Image (cartoon, grey):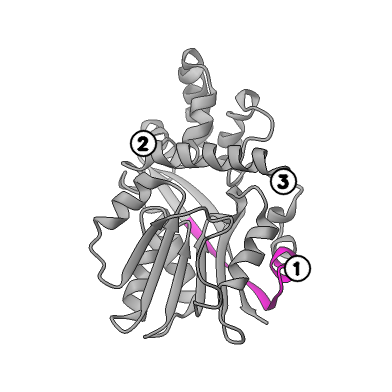
Amino acid sequence: MDLTERGARSARVAAVFDRVADVYDQVGIPWFTPIAQELVRLAAPARGERALDVGCGRGAATVALAAAVGNDGQVTAVDLSPRMIEACGALGLPNVEFQVMDASSPSLPPAAYDLVVSSLVVFFLPDPPAALAAWRSLLVTPGGRLAISTFAHRDPVWDAVDATFRPYLPAGMLDARTTGAAGPFSTDAGVEELVRAAGFTGVRTAHADVEVTFADVDEWQTFSRSHGQRAMWDAIPEADHDTVKATAGALLEQARGADGRLHLTQQVRYTLAESA
């Protein structure tokens, strides 16, 4: 992929997240925050440390990092979407600096951070190995740490629901769960090798299951349009939206529990490592 194509892909991703910034993680369905909080817990930031949150979104990991490093520490949070950074700035965190910046190659001083955290970001990047190597250069050596989250297995109903989008999607569309089924993000070993090849050591993996519940297909649709999956909805002709929704709704009924709600489960992969 040449630089022009990488730039175009980054611009498309930024545009999607600008469009959803107002509703991202704001529709009453706990999702990005619990995933990010577990990532920060596993990363174990200490008071006084300097932490970098790459692809911060609306600050799910940033808030937890800021609390952990305390007033003696410092957090830098970057995102490619200006509107996401604008929303984060409203959080009023005194020990956090927010910057609009490309996660693929942050323009930050080398060896300036004790910890780099990135939650559900690396699979969106046009060149993940290069990005990971760039992040390593920002860490102190030795002693710097990396913590990233990616998606692992999910339950069959959720997989079937997402499959309803696939006939409409253009080739190469990046989506966190449907891209690269045979690539590095499909297995723990694949992600670990990406991290190791970027120069990290002590690479290891942890997992956590995140359950999401919806009242009905309408609530699922609102959720699915509030984050990166919005790009998939945008790829479907307006005239076919009701058809996709109806098909997804019929599949979701398989996940309805005794409490009357729809229950879906996604396993999240947490990959941890140290700078050499």
Q: Amino acid at mark 1?
A: Ala
Res. 206 in view: no
Q: Which mark is residue 219?
A: 2
Question: Which corner quadrant of the image does residue 257 belong to?
Answer: top left
Q: Which mark is residue 197?
A: 1
Callout 2: 10 Å neighbours few (<14), some, many (20+)? some
Q: Amino acid at mark 2?
A: Glu
Question: Which corner quadrant of the image does residue 261 belong to?
Answer: top left
Under tag 1, what secondary structure?
Answer: helix
Under tag 3, what secondary structure?
Answer: loop
Residue 36 in picture, x, y percent from top left: 44, 63
Measure the alpha-carbon separation of dots 2 and 1.
41 Å
Measure the alpha-carbon separation of dots 2 and 3.
27 Å
Res. 41 in view: yes
Choose the circle earlier in sequence order: 3 or 1: 3
Q: Which mark is residue 181?
A: 3
Which quarter shows the N terminus?
A: top right
